[in-house]
Amino acid sequence: MSPPADLREWIALLEREGELVRVSAEVNPYLEVTEIVDRTVRSGGPALLFENTKGSQHPLLINQFGTERRMCLALDVDSLDDAAAKLGSVLEMQPPQGLAEKVRGLKTLKSIADSRPKTVRRAAHHDVVLEGDDVDLDLLPIQHCWPGDPAPFITLPAVITHDPKTGTRNVGMYRMQKLDSRSTAMHWQLHKDGRMDYLATDGRLEVAVALGLDPVSAYSASAPLPKHIDEFMLAGFLKGEPVELVKGRTVDVEVPANAEIVLEGYVEQGDLTTEGPFGDHTGYYSHAEPFPVFHVTAMTMRVDAIYP
């Protein structure tokens, strides 16, 4: 076996393993999804695929990583210790001492080199292309999670930027409060690499956001890696094959070809909005603070895209 190639294969695997329940009844992304999933998570329950979300034609997948067993399935390992050992072989590489260590080191380096992303010309999310005034975030079943939240926010986004000086790619996972049908806030805290890319530019920074990835790529986007390590290269290393990327339609940023939905756009220096307050993992509402505005210039997706 190998890790699922995209979100569709991942859903099929979860279903075969008895780890997913399809919900055909209409469910409201405004507060109701959160309440259902909160109870499900607390009871160690399955991933949920809401097939009929109020106000949207797109299904919503949630709690896909909610148990240790599902994380092991996602990474195609018997235990999380196995995944940690593989990660450690990259992040903690030491200068080899003997011949055996040198051979193992060379094999690891070759595996890393073979894991670099590769560019392709076509992606499934090019089925629907909305640009400019046609962009409409209202099409997506974006969750409004808690009663005190001021707006819905996009969850599980792989936010892709480049360091304006070095060109180094960063993929991170940041909260994106929906402001209107064509813009969101970008919750880049001071210590985040995306924030560093934003501060390094003297004007506009192009951004792409991939939604609905294979589980390994989604995990890699959330991993706290050193800035010099490409998250998509790590994903390729863990998957055993390169992540396929495709060029953006309106930005010079490459995005995963297997994504369900992609948002392209930009942030600009000095263009800030009040973001929050939001119910946080601490159990409290975080304070409202100023964060950059992400302007969406294009929205591409599969016809039957699944929103994560």
Image (tube, grey):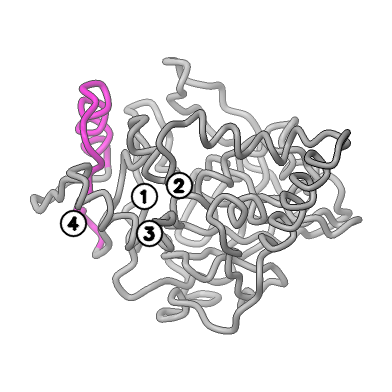
Of the residues shown, which amino acid type is indicated by label 4? Glu
Nearer the N terminus, badge 4 or badge 2?
4
Element on which disc 4 rests:
loop
Camera-nearest residue between 254 and 28: 254
Nearer the N terminus, badge 3 or badge 4?
3
| Residue 209 position within the rendered picture, expressed as x and y whole percent measured from the top left | 56, 58
Structural distance between the alpha carbons of marks 4 and 2: 18 Å
Structural distance between the alpha carbons of marks 4 and 1: 14 Å
* Residue where numbered disc 4 is placed: 51
Q: Are marks 4 and 2 in contact (CB under 8 Å)?
A: no
Mark in front: 3 vs 4: 3
Element on which disc 3 rests:
helix
* Residue where numbered disc 2 is placed: 154
Q: Are marks 2 and 1 in contact (CB under 8 Å)?
A: yes
Number of residues whose C-alpha sits closer than 10 Å to that of mark 2, classed few (under 14), some (14–19) or many (20 or more): many
Nearer the N terminus, badge 1 or badge 3?
3
Nearer the N terminus, badge 4 or badge 1?
4
State which region is magenta.
30-56
Of the residues shown, which amino acid type is indicated by label 1? Ile
Nearer the N terminus, badge 3 or badge 2?
3
* Residue where numbered disc 3 is placed: 7
| Residue 132 position within the rendered picture, expressed as x and y whole percent measured from the top left | 55, 75
Camera-nearest residue between 156 and 225: 225
Q: Residue at point 78% right, 42% down?
A: 227
Q: Residue at point 62% right, 61% down?
A: 208
**Horizontal relation, residue 80 to residue 110: left or right:** left
Instruction: Tell me if residue 78 is in the magenta stretch.
Output: no
